Structures are given as C-alpha cells and as structure tokens.
Amino acid sequence: MDNISVDHLTGIKHLTREDIEIIFKTADSFKQVINRPIKKVPSLRDITIANLFFENSTRTRLSFELAEKRLSADVVNFSAASSSVKKGETLVDTVNNILSMKVDMVVMRHPNPGAAKFLSERIDAAVINAGDGTHEHPTQALLDCYSIREKLGSVEGKKVVIVGDILHSRVALSNIYALQKLGAEVMVCGPTTLIPKYIHELGVHVEHNLLKALNWCDVANMLRIQLERQDIQYFPSLREYSMLYGLNKEILDNLDKEIVVMHPGPINRGVEITSDVADSKQSIILNQVENGVAIRMAVIYLLASKIDRH
Amino acid sequence: MEKQVILNEKQFELTLQRLCHQLIENHDNFSNTVLIGLQPRGVHVLNRLKTMIEQKLGSTVQCGNLDITFYRDDFRRRERPLIPSVTNIDFIIEGKNVVLIDDVLFTGRTIRSGLDALLAFGRPQKVELLAVVDRRFKRDLPIQGDYIGKAVDTLVSERVAVEWKELEGEDKVILFTPKENG
C-alpha cells in the first residue's frame, strides 16, 4: 500500500478517497495501541512538532498533544495569547523563528481561512491544519467519518445531516468533503441565515425543517452555534434557535428509526442538543473524542514518514 | 534470479517436527509459556507449531501475534511507508516465558524491534527466539536464535523465502541468487 498523496494536511479538499482509507487503516492500528497498558510507541522519537494555536482550543489541542506524545515525538506548545504575535509579528516570521529551532512539523490553528495553506507554501516543514477560521478542520472530519465507519460499518451510502451554524463552521465544510469522498449523502439543515447561499453547488441537500431532516438521515451531526464568529444577529434568540433546531429526547424517540447522534464539541447543553440526548446510547460523542487521538496519530505518522532526513 | 530449494516439503516437515519437540523438551506443558509470532510471516510458523504442539500435548497453548511496525528503527529511511498489521495479544506477559517466532533470522533488527514492542505487554521472565531459517554471519546486532530450523550461509544480495502450503501451494524454503552479469 502506498502513502497518502499529500505532504501537508491543509484540508480534506486535497485528499483522495484512497488517502482517507489509508489514514483509517493506520488509525485502526493506533486505536489498538492506545488501548494497551502502555499506550506509547517509539516511531517518531527523532521528530519535533510545534503546536501553534492562534485561537483557543481545549479538545483539539489536547488530542494533538496526546497523539504526538504517544508517538514519542518532542512537543513544543505555543498559544497566541502569551506571545509576540501581540507585539505585531507576522505569521511567517513567528513560524520561521520557531522553525530555526529545528522543528519538523507544525500543527496550526488560526482564525484566518487559508492560513495553513499559506504557511505550507512558505515554510520547510510539514503542516497540519487544526482549524483555519471558517474554512476547514480536516482532522475533525476524518475522526467524524471514522466514528461513523466504526458505528455503522461503513460510510458509503449513509445519509448524514449536519445541523446548525453551517455558515461559520469549518467542521461542516470538511465533513461535507470527507463524507462525499467516502460515498455518503449529505444534507445541511439550519435557519436560512446560517446556511451559505450557494452551498447546494457542493452537491448537498438543503433543508430548513429539523424534523424532516432527521427523518431522512442515518446520522445527525449537531454543530455548535459559534457566537464568537457572529458579527451580526442571525436569529432572534438562542431560545428560539433551540426550539426550532435543538435536538431533544422527545424528537429523537419519535423518529421512525434509530439514528446516530454526533457533536464535534464543545457542547452547549440545552441549545443545539439536550443533556439526555448527549448522554443517550445513540450518541457517539465520546467515541469521537477517543477516535480523535487515533486519527491524529495516523495523520502525523503518515506525514512524518514523508519528511526527508537526508 | 536463480532458485535453489534449501528445504523441500519432507525436510520442512521434519524440521518443524524437531522444533516442536525442542520446544516441548524445554517448556514441559507450556503452563507458563506463551508463543508469539511476528507479523507478517512469523505468524504462519506459529500457527503450524501451535497445531503440532497442541496435538502432542492434548492441551491448548497460549499464542499471540505481534506487529512491530511502530517500533522499527528504519522509519523514514525507506522509500515506501511501513503499513502495520494486526497485533492480537489479549493477555499480559508479565512473568511469562516468551518464545518469539519468525520465519527468517537475518540482520536481527526485526527481533530487536520485537523485543521493544514486547515490553508494552509487561516484563517477561525470559524471552527465547525461534526461526525456521538462520542466515548466519549476517547479523547487524548481537542477537542469536535459541531454536533454529536450518542455518544457511548467504550473501547479502541473496534472498531467502519460506513458503507455505496455504499461501504459495507448497511448504519449502528457497534461496534466490541474483544472476551474475556477463
């Protein structure tokens, strides 16, 4: 089997279906590793990875850091809040400074769409996008699809609805690409103001009625309302949003079939999803988090094998 | 490539029988011994020996397969990526006698990685090594086999393959020699 076709993971858009399948197969092995008494392998002992987070994150950052440490890589962390970025340094300067300290790989989250791609064209290290503004969040989409594959056996032919703030969501875009490449049918659902105008051109169904969407799907991925990215008022109130697009136990129990419920986190309990749904047996939210580490180990491992040492 | 059969089907069977007897001689009823086959090809040796030993003893022997991909020392020194196989060791080897099993013992690097990988499952009492073929004098590391099917003298340019009835149609060991130019 060959390696993945890319040298950087800037987005799902640039991956092929074979790439995604290689990542999944490698992740299967790492999932075994992280369920052993000793969860660590020495593969990347000569690699140094910098985690550059220009935007807040708990889950993704912890997940990346654990993945790196379980591969025995050396890790340096950086967060924008306590750095020279505040003093006016440019992105390329900041990163080049870090790279002169001999770093082989960069994991970056940045508020500007395209930041990871921009960086990958300018620096001499492998770049992994951990979220670039409202653009893409490739590892999240990979772990979402991996979790669906684990729960339902395959992604091919499944119907997946992504509910909520599609306009501001990088998870939505990456998920659409990944799900379609793996042969799933995708629908987006949310208030008109939060659905991008030409999204149907990506080949997704658009629905504004939650109940119809849920009755259609096998899997519902409930997104968080990204209040921090909303510069204007997109809907009258959170309470109204929650009444129209929130998933509760009553709706879930009244569907014709049992659907799988996902959420990329962080959950706003009582807004897009109620506590009893989030904690129900139909929810695979915590499996997503566990799979996140295995998927990130696979991505780092495969990209690291492409770094030339000679 | 010139082919030369080192062990034919009959010799192959005798060799495996001998290895099986040697194991029983040293490990009695296998109550504190586990057999571990190295992925990918050591697993076939393991499966054969397991069946033979269990027939002779009339009891089951604890076995597992170990994949050493993530423990190799040549990561990023190869053209193609190393794609892992499955590890299935559903027991802890703490305090156990372990017999590592592979088909060909050559540089010893696979075994070194195997010893490393083994540590993730506990601290064994003792580790021994079984190989069907030993390409002696070609070691990169100070590693020796405890149970050897057949020792052969080879050149680095040559290749030794252990073939199996269930995979290649016949049990045999073959030495491949590249043709000289001229």
Image (cartoon, coloured by chain):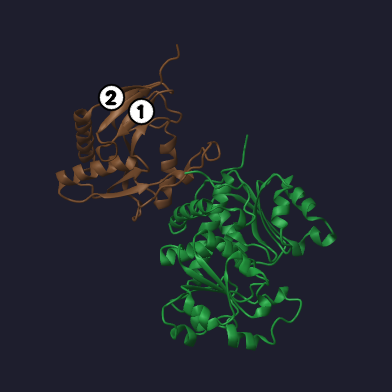
Chain colours: A green, B brown
* The N terminus of chain B sits in image quarter: top left
Q: Which disc, if any, is residue B6?
A: 2
Residue A18: image x %, image y %?
50, 51
Say which residue label 1 marks. B160
The residue nearer to you, when weighing A50 against A121, is: A121
- Please tell me how crowded label 1 is: few (under 14), some (14-19), or many (20+) other residues with Cα within 10 Å: many
Q: Secondary structure at mark 2?
A: strand
Pick whichever of labels 1 and 2 is earlier in the sequence.
2
The amino acid type, in three-letter code, at marker 2 is: Ile
The residue nearer to you, when weighing A203 against B89, is: A203
Q: Is residue B146 visible?
A: no
Q: Is residue B88 left or right of residue B55?
A: right
Quarter residue A308 falls in: top right
Q: At 23% from the left edge and 39% from the top edge, which residue is drawn? A: B23
Quarter residue B136 falls in: top left
Q: Is residue B89 left or right of residue A252?
A: left
Q: At 34% from the left edge and 31% from the top edge, which residue is drawn? A: B161
Does residue B97 lie above or below B129 as drawn?
below
- Dots 1, 2 in contact, CB < 8 A: yes
Chain identity of mark 1 = B
Residue B112: image x %, image y %?
43, 38
Q: Which disc, if any, is residue A136?
A: none
Q: Is residue A105 left or right of residue B35?
A: right
Q: At 66% from the left edge and 79% from the top edge, which residue is drawn? A: A192
Chain identity of mark 2 = B
Q: Is residue B54 visible?
A: yes
Residue A243: image x %, image y %?
59, 88
The amino acid type, in three-letter code, at marker 1 is: Val
Give me the C-alpha separation between circle 1 and circle 2: 9 Å
Residue B168: image x %, image y %?
29, 36
